[in-house]
Amino acid sequence: MNVEVYLTAHSATEDDLKGKAVIVVDVLRASSTVVTALNHGARAVIPVADMAEASRISAHSDATTSLLGGERGGHKIDGYALGNSPLEYTPEMVQGKTIILNTSNGTRSITKARGAADVAIGCFLNASKVIEFAWKAEQDVVILCAGSADRAALEDILCAGLILNQLWGGQEPKNRSDAAHIALTQYAQDHGDLATTLARSNHARHLVELGFEEDVAYCAQVDAIPLLPIYHDSRIVLQNPEDAKVSAKAVPVETVAE
């Protein structure tokens, strides 16, 4: 299986992603927030690249069935109903709603993949489902790590490494890229205590300083919400909506996708 990894979305162009099966990974926190919102009954998530686009879409949306969510620098944007903490996206807040989501890194990464053949949203929470998505892909697979401020983010690299480890059975193919090697090697080194390693990442420490320590622990759960969000026609929806509102517990990394 041919799998490419981009350690930041900044390092990939739209042409790099065109026609591919793309997994967009932003563990802290956009991907985790999308998975959680859809699991809790949100009708769809519309990812946008900036505040101007978010405002335009919101102005043409039904205020009773849509919500603005997003952050800049980790903080909720003034005037938005929600930030980018997955714990804010409760059933009471989001059920039946369309979320217009605008984040610093994740939503820009998702919209960059608009020309891909298929796009899935991935994180630790739904690891087994994105691995299944990659197995079934008819095109070459790309794991697009969002990163943070155009720099590599350890949590996204670890998630990419987990996906590669399962797809490749822990064995590197000879034709793997340097970025894929980095992700797989990092995961092999740190998978024994994934949650602790993630909590020590730069972005996790920043979130803890802002008071989002619970978010970091929540986003480190492997396969706690085995759902597959897909991005199509500018909207993210669940591939199988009937699977929403699961109550599965996190499972050990070694058992994912076996």
Image (spheres, grey):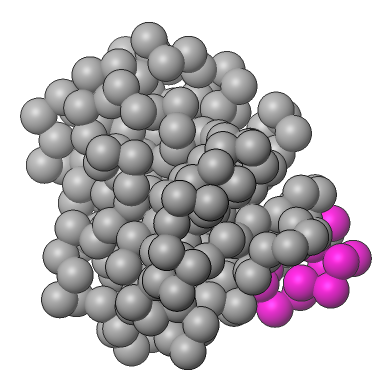
- Picture quadrant of residue 68: bottom right
Q: Does the magenta stretch include residue 208?
A: yes
- Picture quadrant of residue 44: bottom left
Residue at image position (51%, 34%) is 109
Up-down relation of residue 122 to residue 12 (above or below): below
Name the residue furthest right. 209
Up-down relation of residue 224 to residue 153 (above or below): below
Up-down relation of residue 164 to residue 211 (above or below): above
Question: Which quadrant is the C terminus positioned in?
Answer: bottom left
> x and y percent of residue 14 in the render?
42, 16
> x and y percent of residue 128 in the render?
28, 60
Residue 250 appearing in the image: no
- Range of the magenta residues? 206-216
Name the main secondary structure of what is drawn in magenta: helix
Residue at image position (55%, 27%) is 9
Horizontal side, residue 82 vs residue 174: left or right: right
> x and y percent of residue 103 in the render?
63, 47
Q: Nearer the viewer, residue 256 or 87?
A: 87
Residue at image position (84%, 73%) is 211
Name the residue furthest top. 15
Q: Does the magenta stretch include residue 123?
A: no
Residue at image position (39%, 28%) is 113
Question: Which quadrant is the N terminus positioned in?
Answer: top left
> x and y percent of residue 160 in the render?
45, 42
Q: Nearer the viewer, residue 221 or 161?
A: 221
Q: Which of 202 and 70 is in front in this view?
A: 70
